[in-house]
Structure formats: structure tokens, C-alpha cells
Amino acid sequence: MNHSPELARLQQSVRESRLGITREYAGLLSDLDLQKRFTESVKRHPLGWIGGAAAAGLLATLFGGRRKTSSVSGKSPRKAASPAAEIAGASSFTKAGWIAGALEIGKLLYPVLRPVVVEFVSNAARAGLAKRGRLQ
């Protein structure tokens, strides 16, 4: 029975090691939860994410648009009636590209930005109502 204190000390050491490993494992799982980290980042910095999404949409629209193709059949491409009509047609395609790009980015970011926008609007509404209540 001489080994009883040493055995108890070793058992306590094993328990402490297990608890330490459990804490480290939980911390590692938390660090590797990318969806949670992404959502928290968007909640902490919503304007940065919205600005980044707008910049990405702008770049996608500017550099991801349609390319002009040459005619393969040998026929000459149809000319616009006037240079003004050609410019008007180009600007309408550009506007459509901007809108399409913004909608695509909105669809991608909607699940993440929805809670942020709802919280922002509800906080603004509460602040407005509280301010209105104080003024009256």
C-alpha cells in the first residue's frame, strides 16, 4: 500500500491531462468552424463586407462581361443606325450588367447578411422610436 499516494497523484495527473485535452479540442473545433467565424465577422464589420461585395460586383461586371465575337459566316455584322443609338445600346447593356452583378452578389450573401441587416434595421427603429418618444 506504499504506492497509494503515488497512484492517486498519477490518477489526478491523468484527469487533469484529459481536461486539458478536452479544452484544447473544443477550442480547435471553435477555431475551425468557418461558417461561425464568417458570420461573426460579417456581424462585427457589416459595412466592410457590403463594400467588399460591391467592389467584387463592380469588378465582375467590368471584367466578366460579354466579349465581342467576330462573325464566322463571312457576313458583315449589322451596323447600328447611328452612333448615338450604338452608345445608347451599350449603356443599356452596361446597366443590365451592373444590375445582374449586384443581384448575383446579393443572392450569394443573403443568408449571411440577412441577420445583420435585420439587427441593424431593428436597432435603428428602436433608436428612432425612443428618440421620437423623448421628443413628444
Image (cartoon, rainbow, N blue to C red):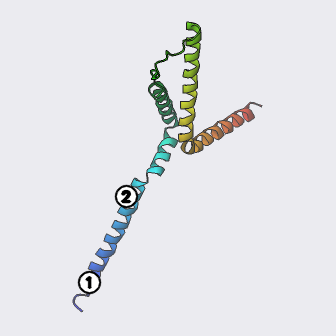
Check disc 1 and give the amino acid type.
Leu
51 and 21: which one is in front?
51
The C terminus lies in quadrant:
top right
**74 lies left or right of 24:** right
Residue designated by label 1: 7
* Circle 2: element type: helix
Most extreme residue toward the front is: 74
68 and 39: which one is in front?
68
86 and 115: which one is in front?
86
Residue 77 to residue 130: above or below = above
Mark nearer the N terminus (2 vs 1): 1
Question: In the image, residue 18 lies at what x, y percent?
Answer: 34, 71
Which of the numbered marks, if any, corresponds to residue 100? none
Residue at x 56%, y 22% (from the top left corner): 93
Which of the numbered marks, if any, corresponds to residue 28? 2
Most extreme residue toward the right is: 136
Res 14 → quadrant: bottom left
Residue 131 to residue 10: above or below = above
Check disc 2 and give the amino acid type.
Leu
Res 127 → quadrant: top right
Res 121 → quadrant: top right
Most extreme residue toward the bottom is: 1
**29 lies left or right of 7:** right
Whether residues under marks 2 and 1 lie with C-beta atoms below 8 angstroms apart, the answer is no
Most extreme residue toward the left is: 2
Question: In the image, residue 64 lies at what x, y percent?
Answer: 46, 29
* Circle 1: element type: helix
11 and 85: which one is in front?
85
Residue at x 73%, y 34% (from the top left corner): 134
